[in-house]
Image (cartoon, rainbow, N blue to C red):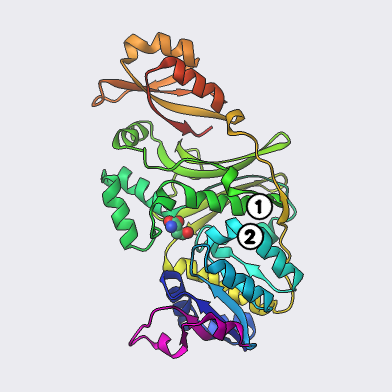
Amino acid sequence: MVNIAVLGYGTVGSGVVEVINTNHASINKKAGTEINIKYVLDLRDFPGDPVQKVLVHDFDTIINDPEVDVVVEVMGGIEPAYTFTKRALEAGKSVCTSNKALVAEHGTELVQMAQDREINYLFEASCGGGIPIIRPLNSSLTADEIDEITGILNGTTNYILSKMATDGSDFAEVLKDAQDKGYAERNPEADVEGYDACRKIAILSSLAYGRHVNYEDIYTEGITKIDATDIKYAKHLDNSIKLLATSKKVGDGFYAMVSPVMINQNSPLYSVNNVFNAIFVHGNVLGDAMFYGSGAGKLPTASAVVADVVDCAKHLHRNIFMNWSSKTLNLMSVDSVENRFFVRIKGSLTRDMEQVEQVLGHVETVSLPDAPEEFAVITDKMTEADFKAKAEKLGTVISRIRAWV
Ligand code: HSE
């Protein structure tokens, strides 16, 4: 028997208990041993919930119990999750988590601590909810040099952008709906400003490229400035707007970026809608691969956490090596990254095009019948710095969204 302790009985924690209870027999069979929930830690009480039988309020009960083999940290946030995780690893207990903030901030150290002690720190649920992506990067794709990861890594923003496109609903209304459904973070800023996707691409990139990618080095824009007119332009162009988190090798360097991108139907990410996530990976021998599925929510996330528990049970005193070194990967400056840009411009297409082309070079044009005061263009590829200078020179740019290359 493998005894586990679940830290936090919130959305994911209660999901972990539910998954283990629902699929108890098959999970035990696959683990080759019985997975027993010995404790659930929470400050609150849950009268009438069977969890009361295993509920504890003091972390020391768990840490001092030598029978606990695996700690499931699903509290979220940095503290006390960080302290509890370190104490658990120091006590020789493996840890499984969905806590992307903690993995992005302290993953290098926690992975190393687990390696030093022949135990495990696993975090499949930290990126892409229920989609297997950490394990494939860490085992199935080890023959490859990965040179690109581009993903829709945040369910809340994908849900919001999809709903805005299909229902014409406004941002605030859709955000409230996403929170009610348990997709959004308590503080929705992390989702809508792109911080959540930023942490996830930092984790995936650290694993894929084998060096620590500091999430604070990643250029990040959210979706709060996307408005109904942007969506109309996108529809007019048969495009969709997605919040993409990407990291890519260019020459000998790497860049990473999170931003809304206008993508067309040729992109494999075009049809990824609602709360679904997808991660596109390119390897030098594999070519393209795409991982798609339920990217957020209680049970999909809990499914990934419990799969990690099973892996811990199968490797109780053996570390599953992860290629995540403490050396930092220095990212290229975003100024030198090349993109195409969808640009909304004040004025009229017929009157102002000559000047626009003088400044921006060759462009494709688009205008909307119900937006007579403006028009839009899509540029050829140019560096971010180049675009910024040209947009300033033009002086009539309303907004810009990157366009899929
Ligand atoms: N708030 C996150 C999302 C939850 O919407 O993707 C899953 O990490």
Q: Residue at x 45, y 12 (%)?
A: 357
> Range of the magenta residues?
38-65
Q: Which residue is mark 1?
A: 206
Compare residues 403 and 47 and report the one nearer the observer.
47
Question: Where on the picture, by quarter, is residue 381?
Answer: top right
| Residue under label 2 | 107
User: Percent from the top left, x then y, of residue 325?
Assistant: 73, 55
Element marked by disc 1: helix
- Residue 369 in the magenta stretch? The answer is no
The kind of residue tagged 2 is Gly
Nearer the observer: mark 1 or 2; the answer is: 2
Image-quadrant location for residue 256: top right
Task: Identify the residue shown where x is 53% and y is 62%.
Answer: 78
- Callout 2 secondary element: helix
Which is nearer the N-term, disc 1 or disc 2?
A: 2
Q: From what the image shows, is residue 212 above or below residue 302?
A: above
